[in-house]
Every structure is written in C-alpha cells, then in structure tokens.
Image (tube, rainbow, N blue to C red):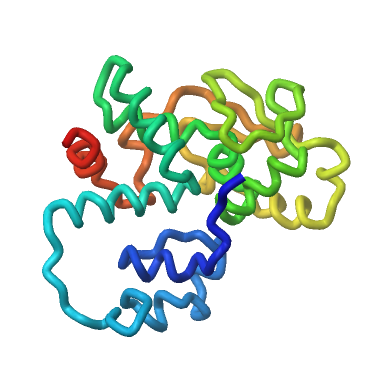
Amino acid sequence: MARYRGSVCRLCRREGTKLFLKGARCASAKCSFEKRPWAPGTAGKGRFKISDYGVQLREKQKVKRIYGVLEKHFRNYFKKADNQKGVTGTNLLRMLELRLDNVVYRLGLASSRDQARQFVLHGNVLVNKVRTNIPSFKVSDGDEIEVVKDTIKSEFFTNRVKDLTDKTIVPWLTYDNKKNQGKVVRLPERDDITDINIEERLIIELYSK
C-alpha cells in the first residue's frame, strides 16, 4: 500500500501552516515549523508569486495531508461528495471526518491521526462490537467505538485516557470513560470543524476545471 514515509514536519513547512501531524510535539518548542517557518529546500525562503491554480493545489494538498489520504482516494471522496445532495464541500469534509482513524483521533484515543491509523491497523478498535482494522472505514450515526479489552489494560491506553475530558471531544462524538466507549451521536457539520483552517471552495474549483 502506497504511503508517505518521509518527514511529516516538511509537510507542515511546505504548506506554510501547522498540520498537527505529530501530536503533542507540534505544540512544543521542538516543533520544526516554529524553528523554520518556511518551505523546505534551498529556495524555501524565496518570495514567489503563486497563481490561482497554485493556491487551489496547495489547499487540496493541505487537506490530503491533514487526513492522511492519497490522491486516488481523495479524488474518489470528491466524486462521491459531488454526487450527493447538499453542499459538495461540506459532504467532502464530512466523509473525511467519518473515517475511523479520524474518529479515533477525535475521541482523544490517539495524539495524531497517524497514531490513530496505526492503532486501527493493529486491530485495537471495535465498531459495534466488531473488530475493524481498516482506517478508512466509514462510521455512521449511532455507531459505538471502543478499544479491545487487552489494549485497555496497557500502559499506553491508561495514560492516554486518564485526562480525557469533554473538552477534547467534538460536538458530534461522546466518550464514556467508565465503559471506555465512544459513540457517534450525529453526523458532523461544517461548523464542527473549527480546529483546521480549510477553504474547501478552492478544492472544488480545482477539481471542477
């Protein structure tokens, strides 16, 4: 399976903004973007006039990298979003938010989407009592997400959830600490995505050419 295996800090620098791909490190003084907030490469500090196409392309690349989706899958998401009723941009972001790896991250069970992806791939997550190891699995309204019993006892999981509060949960998800179980209480809306600066209009314009 194709996957980017380079430095994720370079991706933040290339997009000119923090993508929070490394969890807590991104909020610390060790963050590479804080030290070198310019694009990687010898010409990174140069000033360039970017075209309208370039702006649209950078926005698409930014969203792909935030959610860890490659071009082929991202284009398929766009096609499905465009064929659905409603606003295409909202449909696209909703499908990305409903990916299982993103839901695990949103529940606070992982410090980054990449860590959540690994968490899912290793078979540590149950969806409606069924072990699911597909990061792109689409959860639905009412689905229950929980961690397998063996993982609950691990030091990693214990340290991860001990400080978990309602503040770390987005409005469309809930988490029961006693049951170690999360639930999708409703589908995400555009206004629920406030931690990421996304202009989905630019992506639509890019794919509509």
Q: Quadrant of residue 90?
A: top left
Q: Residue at x 65, y 34 (%)?
A: 134
Which residue occupies the foreground of this view, 77 or 200? Answer: 77
Q: Residue at x 18, y 39 (%)?
A: 205
Location of residue 111 in the rendering, given as x and y in whole percent from the top left corner: 60, 56
Q: Residue at x 47, y 60 (%)?
A: 20
Q: Is residue 43 left or right of residue 134?
A: left
Q: Is residue 167 left or right of residue 43?
A: right
Q: Quadrant of residue 62?
A: bottom left
Which residue occupies the foreground of this view, 100 or 192? Answer: 100
Which residue occupies the foreground of this view, 25 or 39? Answer: 39
Q: Residue at x 24, y 37 (%)?
A: 207
Location of residue 141 in the rendering, given as x and y in whole percent from the top left corner: 52, 19
Q: Quadrant of the N terminus?
A: top right
Location of residue 77 in the rendering, given as x and y in whole percent from the top left corner: 40, 31
For the image, the number of numbered tags is 0
Q: Quadrant of residue 163?
A: bottom right
Q: Quadrant of the C terminus?
A: top left
Q: Is residue 76 left or right of residue 99?
A: left
Residue 42, compared with residue 59, is above or below; it is below
Residue 37, compared with residue 129, is above or below; it is below
Residue 160, compared with residue 139, is above or below; it is below
Location of residue 11 in the rendering, given as x and y in whole percent from the top left corner: 42, 64
